[in-house]
Amino acid sequence: MNILCNQKTLAQAITNAQKAINNKTNIELLRGILLTAKNNSLIVTGYDNEISIETTLEAQVNSEGSIVINSRLMGDIVRKLPDTFISIETDEEYNVFINCMNSRFKIKGIPADEFPRQSEVSMDNMVRFNQSEMKNMIKQTVFATASEPINPTLAGELFEINSEYVNMVAVDGYRLAVRKSKVDEEVENPINAIIPGATLNHLNSLLLDDGDFFIGLDDKNIIFKLENTRIVARLIEGNFTKYENLLPKEHITKIEVETRKLQNAIERAALLFTSGKNNMIKISINDKLMAITSNNENGNAYEELEIDFEGESLEIAFNSRYFLEGIKNIDSEKISIEFGGSVNPCVIKPIDGVEYIYLLLPVRLSN
């Protein structure tokens, strides 16, 4: 292999690939990135047995070939080089020579023969979707995936696409987030899959604020195709929980409140909490007022908000972090909150804008 490419674009491609690398692995091959030079392009790939991220960049290819190079070492070298052209060359003993202006490196590579090859999906079978909209959908749901679930499916999100909508659902046993968006084109091959939350976080870091990207599926993988980057990730097998059955059919108390005022009030009440434990806030609803209180060994806090109110007075408690995660990404000026009583889940929805539901279980109050 003998190529010439731009330092900045190569550094970004390596950064993308490194998102897919698990540095804790003992497999030296998977701690590396795969460089493949062909057709006047350089393809940079990272893989960790669950997800592959590859970025294609323009390069002057004098000699085609492929090599695996330690990801951390290659990334550190390229990012420290000046913003100009880099020459990369390999020899028959898998040595890699990196030259840039007055800098010269020789590092040991690994044969690329055993590096895993990823699925190819025809663009004809892929669905086009807006990048900005997907960023918002991921942001409003992925936090509700479970980090250490008993049921493996809860570590991912239900991902549904048909000719009417894209639907994303996350649930972790304490809360449920559902985000739906319309689809503007005919979908010949509907998608119904469970995508790992980690994959969606990786995708979110690569999405832009404008433009479209493509989504495809094979038997075991989801494929996301951006302009010059492709993500192939293994799906979670199993049946996702029937989330529709978790949504309450009725309520006894309903309020409407300004989103940012509620967020700010809860954030202030939560200032007393110095650890992840014992972060309960109590909410009292009576007539036109909502009172938010917190109390622990550090002291106590009281916040009061005006609300639009219908139904019965109520006292209920929540994990403050879980409550905040549900509302801080809602762009609507006001939200509605429906309560089914002090021991039943509440449902939070924006008054206008996107179709979003956040369900949260309360913390039981002691008598």
Image (cartoon, grey):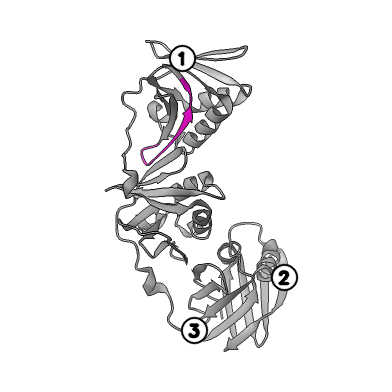
Q: What stretch is highlighted in magenta?
A: 48-60
Specify the amino acid type for callout 2: Ala
What x and y, as percent, mark residue 57? 48, 30
Label 1 residue SS: strand
What x and y, as percent, mark residue 140? 52, 60
Q: Nearer the viewer, residue 266 or 2?
A: 2
Q: Please identify, in this view, whether the residue under mark 1 or under mark 3 is nearer the observer.
A: 1
Residue 353 lies in the magenta-colored region: no
Q: Which of 20 and 183 is in front in this view?
A: 183
Q: Is residue 161 above or below residue 210?
A: below
Residue 289 visible, this orientation: yes
Q: Which residue is drawn at 45% across and 84% down?
A: 250
Q: Which residue is drawn at 63% across and 83% down?
A: 285
Specify the amino acid type for callout 1: Glu
Residue 313 visible, this orientation: no
- Which residue is disc 2 drawn over? 301
Instruction: Report, in whole angstroms, how far the alpha carbon at label 1 lies from the one at label 2.
Output: 64 Å
